[in-house]
Image (cartoon, rainbow, N blue to C red):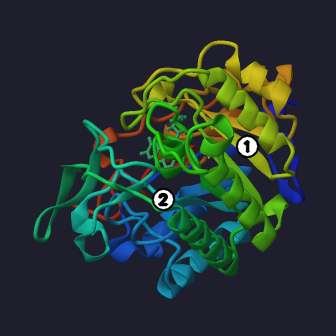
Amino acid sequence: MSPLFKPYDLAGTALTNRVVMAPMTRARARDDIPDEHTVLYYAQRASAGLIISEGAPISREGCGYLFNPGLYNDAQVQGWRRVTDAVHAKGGKIFAQLWHVGRVSHVSIQPDGAAPVSSVAVTAAKSNAYAWVAEGQPGPVQASTPRGLEAHEVHRVTADFVSAARRAMDAGFDGVELHGANGYLFEQFLNGALNTRTDEYGGSIANRQRFLLETLDALAAEIGSAQVGVRISPFGRLFDMHPYAEEAESWLSLAAALNARSLAYVHLSDQLTLGAEAIPQGFAEQFRQAYQGTLMAAGGFTRLLAEAVLEKGDLDLVAFGRPFIANPDLVARMQHDWPLADADRATFYGIEGSPTRGYTDYPVASQGA
Ligand SMILES: Cc1cc2nc3c(=O)[nH]c(=O)nc-3n(C[C@H](O)[C@H](O)[C@H](O)COP(=O)(O)O)c2cc1C
């Protein structure tokens, strides 16, 4: 039997296979609340061994894009409850991705029109938020200049993550994934080229990692470490992240720090299909040496590539992003070698037009895809 379709024990959460649906923002939630379309979209994809939800903002400050279903108010919890119930009814499992965009935001969607927050007051060049271009008109806008968080505010953001994790569990999620990847808030602290803070959250490698590790520990204390995963993007270049000295050493020391915690998993986001450079050849294997817990990765996988890494033992689970947009029955299609449909980029994001088009209207293979 192909290793991809074997069950997996994810720290006590029983997965029916090793195919993970990667977190994907779809920006279709009017008022930032999951609705019946969100419920159907995730239920259609529940044959994945594990679904990781689209990034769910943990606070209004954490929002960088309009129409993302968050985890900071009761209506959102009720909306997500319908999603998790529908996924569980089909035998699936679902983690919530907890998200704070940091500086990749715009004053028009920040509370009181304030500046977004980050490690330091440096604008993400050539980086768009999705906010109000004009009143009532959503669209891409250059991210605003952020302000650096005070140390006591860093603790407050950690507390916001803990509240969101509590809400996620109340909403019936099987666990949470801390979004530490792709140029957002945590990477703005991890990155040695950007984070020039002089307090305990900047400077040395350990100081730059402190915010991420403190937040993981706080989440684990609140909901249990078996319910907490983390996503990171070693050598990430999205949203104006740049190379820095001792970059490989930084990521490997983070791997060791994560290894010392018994988290549900670590998830590597390889940006090669997101318009940035790939993780350097051989690095994932080095990471694996330093991190012996459950490891998954996303970025350009096909069935054959996924089977090869699972067989080699480099990964335990493989996450698929875009293939899950256009193939709700991706697991069955891969299992039977049925052809895969291509996702339409034009309908990746947004609430303009039909609420179902490019979202819940991709057919399963037996319906003639
Ligand atoms: C439409 C879209 C939205 C995405 N949103 C998120 C997100 O909310 N959080 C995240 O960590 N990654 C996000 N990603 C990245 C995916 O999780 C995944 O890493 C990426 O698509 C690479 O996998 P693939 O080559 O199988 O598509 C997004 C990707 C796409 C295509």
Q: Residue 112: where, in percent of width, then height?
A: 26, 77
Depicted 95 relative to depicted 124: above or below: below
Pointer 2 residue Cβ closer than 8 Å to ligand 1 = no
Check mark 1 vs ligand 1: CB closer than 8 Å? yes or no. Answer: no
The quarter holding residue 154 reads: bottom right
Determine contact: label 1, label 2, CB under 8 Å: no
Residue at disc 2, secondary structure:
loop
Residue 310 makes an appearance in the image: no
Q: In this view, does 21 lie to the left or right of 295?
A: left
Q: Which amino acid does label 2 sit on?
A: His
Q: Decide which of 230, 193 is in the foreground and name it.
A: 193
Label 1: how many residues lie within 10 Å, few (<14), some (14-19) or many (20+)?
many
- Classify residue 206 by image quadrant: top right
Q: Residues within 10 Å of mark 2 (few under 14, many from 20)?
A: many
Residue 269 higher or lower than 263, as above or below: above
Helix, strand or loop at label 1? It is: strand
Furthest-bottom residue in view? 74
Viewer-side residue, 293 vs 152: 152
- What residue is shown at x 51% (from left), y 67% (from top)? 153
Q: Where is mark 2, residue-wise? A: 100
Question: As drawn, is 57 to the left or to the right of 81?
Answer: left
Q: Say the numbered circle drawn on residue 10.
A: none
Q: In the rendered structure, find residue 266 and report the number of the disc placed on it.
A: 1
* Residue at 32% across, 44% down: 122
What is the three-letter code of the residue carrying label 1? Val
| Quarter of the image that includes the N terminus | top right
